[in-house]
Structure formats: structure tokens, C-alpha cells
Image: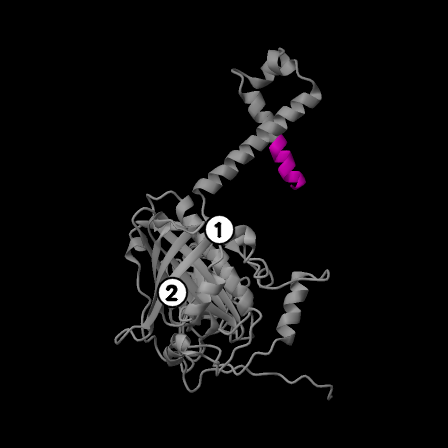
């Protein structure tokens, strides 16, 4: 605890002790409060600290019961084994450097990708975001809509998101004051020029704001959006409210992540051990937790036209304790994937209520994915329920992260007939690649000068 927090605790404790008396608290001290004046200096300090800690405990308990759950992991936090005194960052760097990548598909599929949560962008605010190997400036105009443009000013390359100001529906460059419209990227003002050239503009990304998220459309050929992200009406109407989010960075090709939906066999091996056994795959099969098991039944299928860009994974989850089935915790989930980067995990339970986890996979770089899980749940269900669901999802997901961060992509895998859905998924996912989709460019490191 920092010195400032210690001071706050002691100060709050002293204030509570002084204000519990009627009248002027200083007069009470001067006139000899029977309770307070009889205490020694050390005892008074202890009472103050106890009172302050009690307030902190009440705040912590309130956050636990009613506040959202937020788990934000860095690129090196999960999925690596740090041994022999190495740091996690060093272990992660060694894995990235030595790992074979395999024959990879194109690295940036065509589709919609989340760049930011709506709540993190206030009117007149600008954010710098890395997405699809590019730097973009995300800003909310004074008129309300959010816009996404390339971060670098075409004039002399200043970063519009670093010091740039929002002026109406435009963003103003911090270097020379050029102003660019958010809806089309056109330059509308150059403070020192008589005329603005017609060709002066910054790239404007097609974007939308739905379900509390800001998303951008990417197509390698610059084609217009070919589908829309469905609006979850319960979120829009406020029937389902925000209960938390998690964020992870995955060092893998983007296709590896949604392919898990069709890899049915991995569920019974990787995700059967109880969530209480943790995320480190060296210990998840600990005998201490053998009495608690997750059982899964899964089916994956692509959707027909006109929704060929969508697929569905239907999941039936059951929990057994000492071999006895607990029907109360049976959960049915429909995971509907919309394009390469967005998944709706819909929960519907007679006792635990209804809600959705929005899983968004956004390429930051060719082999670095930002994966977020945001949960919205019935407002009349105690927050502990959706927070427990999100925490359980987080634990199971981090087991996958340990696999993804260390594996090689196999373009022609050795499959058995029970793995047929994997090949089916790859054929379905291939629709998001075009002839000009960007490929990973390997750099050759030599000593030639």
C-alpha cells in the first residue's frame, strides 16, 4: 500500500472517530470525550487504522458484489512458463523467437473488428489504437458519432491521436492545425492556406458502433462492408447491463482462435478438469480436483445463405461432483460467429438467467491478436452470477492461450474422421481471404553489410 493510501486510511479513520460524536468534534476532544480522551496515543492510532481499514473493506465488498469484473492481461502475462529465474517477458520473447510458425494463411482476413469499447471514448476525446498492422486515431465528434481515421497526417506525418483535438466532427492535427472530417477523411481547413487542395485527405475507415463497441471494416481490396454486425436488442434497450470484461493478447494466427469451436475433441481433454485447478496445463489434472469435472457436448455448423459469413457452435455443459450430475448447473450456450472477428456467446438458463458474452478477436499485428470478452446480463440477476460466468470463461480461455502461444500452425494437419469439423471450419473460414489478402513477410537476418 502506498504512503498516500496509508494517509487516506488513517485520515478517514480519524474523521470517523471524531464525527461519531454529536456537536463540534474538536470541542468534544478539547472538553475531554470520555471515550476518546481515555485512550492513549497508540490506541487512538490503532482505532483510526481499524476504522479506515473497515471502510476500505466495505468498499472492496461493494465492488465484489456490485462492481463489474475486469481482467486485463498483457502479452506476456499468460501462456508462458518462466523457469530458471527468467521473467515472464524473457520467457515469452524466447518462445516467439524460436517458435516455428508453419505455412500460414493470410494474416488479415476481411471483416469487422472491434477497436474500442464505446464507454472508453467520450465526446471530444481521441484514442490511439493499433489494429491490423496500422495505427489509427479513434475520436468522437462533438455531434456524437465515433470516427476512425489513419493516425498519421498526410501533410508531414504527425500522429493525429497524440495531441490532436476534436473540432465539431473533425480532428485537428497537433502539428499545423489541419482539420480532417471524420465521416470521409477530407481536409476542410488549413489555417495558413488560401485554398484546401481537393486531394488533401486522410484515410477514413468504415466503422459502426453497436452493442457498446466501436468496430471497423477491413477489406484488402477496399471493398465496402459485405455484412453488418447484428444489434443485440436487450443491450440497446438496457435489459442486459454491463457486468465486466476480460482482455488477452494471443501470439498466434487469427484463424487458430475461432477454429477451437470446431475442435470438439480438445474440449474433453483440455477443458474437462475443474476450473479450480487453474490455467497452468502442467497442473490442471491434479488429483486434488478429480472429484469435480466439466462435461461437454458440442456441435459446430456453418449457416446457409444469406448468412454464409456466420457459423454456430451449440454447447451443452454439465458439472459432476464425485461422479454425481448437478442439473442446476447445466448450461446451454449458442456461440454464433459473425465473420472472422466477432462471436456472440448467448446464455439461457432457467435459474441463472440470460445474457451474452461478446468475444472479439482483433489482429494487432500479423501474429498478435487482442481478444476481449465483454459480458452483458439481465439487470435483475445478482452481479455475482455473470461475474462468476465470466471468470470461469476466463480460466478456460487462458488454458487455450497456453496452447496457442506455443504451437505451430499446421496447414495440412493429420486428422482422423472424428476431426472432420476442423477441415470443414477451415473451408468456411477461407471465404474471408481474397487474392490480395496480406501474407506474413519473413525477414532474413544476415551479417551482410
| Prevailing SS of the magenta stretch | helix
Q: Secondary structure at mark 1?
A: loop
Q: How is the image coloured?
A: one colour
Query: Which dot, 2 or 1, sits closer to the camera?
Result: 1
Density class for disc 1 (Cα within 10 Å; few <14, some 14-19, many ≥20) is few
Residue 5 lies, in percent from the top left, at 62, 38
Asked whether disc 2 touches disc 1, contact meaning CB atoms under 8 Å apart, the reply is: no
Can you tell which quarter of the image residue 113 is in?
bottom left
Residue at mark 2? 343
The span picked out in magenta is: 1-10
Residue at mark 1? 291
Please state, as top left, top right, bottom left or bottom right, where the C terminus lies in the image.
Answer: bottom right
Foreground residue among 393 and 433: 393
Residue 320 lies, in percent from the top left, at 42, 52
Q: Secondary structure at mark 2?
A: strand
Residue at the (61%, 35%) spot, across then down: 8
Q: Is residue 276 left or right of residue 379?
A: right
Residue 159 lies, in percent from the top left, at 54, 68
Amino acid at each position: 500500500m502506498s504512503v498516500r493510501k496509508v494517509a487516506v486510511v488513517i485520515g478517514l479513520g480519524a474523521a470517523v472517530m471524531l464525527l461519531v460524536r454529536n456537536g463540534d468534534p474538536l470541542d468534544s476532544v478539547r472538553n475531554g470525550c470520555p471515550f476518546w480522551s481515555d485512550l492513549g496515543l497508540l490506541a487512538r492510532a490503532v482505532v483510526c487504522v481499524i476504522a479506515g481499514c473497515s471502510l476500505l473493506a466495505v468498499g472492496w465488498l461493494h465492488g465484489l458484489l456490485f462492481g463489474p469484473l475486469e481482467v486485463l492481461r498483457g502479452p506476456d502475462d499468460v501462456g508462458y512458463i518462466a523457469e530458471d529465474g527468467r521473467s515472464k517477458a524473457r520467457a515469452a520473447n524466447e518462445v516467439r523467437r524460436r517458435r516455428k510458425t508453419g505455412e500460414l494463411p493470410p494474416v488479415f482476413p476481411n471483416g469487422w473488428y472491434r477497436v474500442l469499447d464505446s464507454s472508453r471514448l467520450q465526446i471530444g476525446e481521441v484514442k490511439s489504437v493499433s489494429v491490423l498492422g496500422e495505427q489509427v486515431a479513434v475520436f468522437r465528434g462533438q455531434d456524437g458519432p465515433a470516427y476512425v481515421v489513419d493516425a498519421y497526417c498526410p501533410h508531414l506525418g504527425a500522429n493525429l491521436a497524440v495531441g490532436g483535438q476534436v473540432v465539431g466532427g473533425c480532428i485537428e492535427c497537433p502539428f499545423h492545425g489541419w482539420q480532417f472530417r471524420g465521416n470521409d477523411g477530407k481536409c476542410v481547413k488549413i489555417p495558413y492556406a488560401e485554398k484546401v487542395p481537393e486531394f488533401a485527405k486522410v484515410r477514413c475507415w468504415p466503422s459502426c458502433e453497436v452493442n457498446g463497441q466501436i468496430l471497423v471494416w477491413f477489406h484488402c481490396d477496399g471493398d465496402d462492408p459485405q455484412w453488418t454486425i447484428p444489434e443485440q436488442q436487450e443491450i440497446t434497450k438496457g435489459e442486459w447491463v454491463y457486468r465486466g470484461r476480460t482482455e488477452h493478447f494471443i501470439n498466434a494466427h487469427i484463424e487458430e482462435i475461432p477454429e477451437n469451436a470446431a475442435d470438439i475433441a480438445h474440449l474433453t481433454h483440455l477443458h474437462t478438469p475443474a476450473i479450480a485447478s487453474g490455467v497452468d496445463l502442467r497442473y490442471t489434472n491434479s488429483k486434488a480436483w478429480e472429484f469435480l469435472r466439466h462435461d461437454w457436448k458440442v456441435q459446430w455448423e456453418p449457416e446457409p445463405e444469406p448468412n454464409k459469413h456466420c457459423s454456430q457452435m451449440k454447447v451443452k455443459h454439465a458439472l459432476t461432483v464425485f461422479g454425481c450430475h448437478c442439473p442446476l448447473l447445466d448450461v446451454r450456450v449458442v456461440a454464433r460467429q459473425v465473420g472472422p472477428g466477432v462471436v456472440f456467446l448467448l446464455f439461457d438458463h432457467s435459474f441463472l438467467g440470460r445474457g451474452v458474452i461478446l468475444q472479439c478477436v482483433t489482429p494487432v499485428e500479423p501474429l498478435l491478436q487482442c481478444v476481449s470478452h465483454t459480458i452483458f446480463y439481465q439487470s435483475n440477476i445478482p452481479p455475482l452470477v455473470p461475474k462468476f460466468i465470466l471468470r470461469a470463461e476466463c480460466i478456460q480461455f487462458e488454458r487455450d492461450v497456453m496452447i496457442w502461444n506455443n504451437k505451430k500452425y499446421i496447414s495440412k494437419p493429420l486428422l482422423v474422421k472424428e476431426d472432420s469439423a476442423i477441415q470443414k471450419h477451415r473451408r468456411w473460414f477461407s471465404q474471408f481471404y481474397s487474392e490480395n489478402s496480406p501474407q506474413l513477410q519473413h525477414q532474413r537476418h544476415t551479417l551482410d553489410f
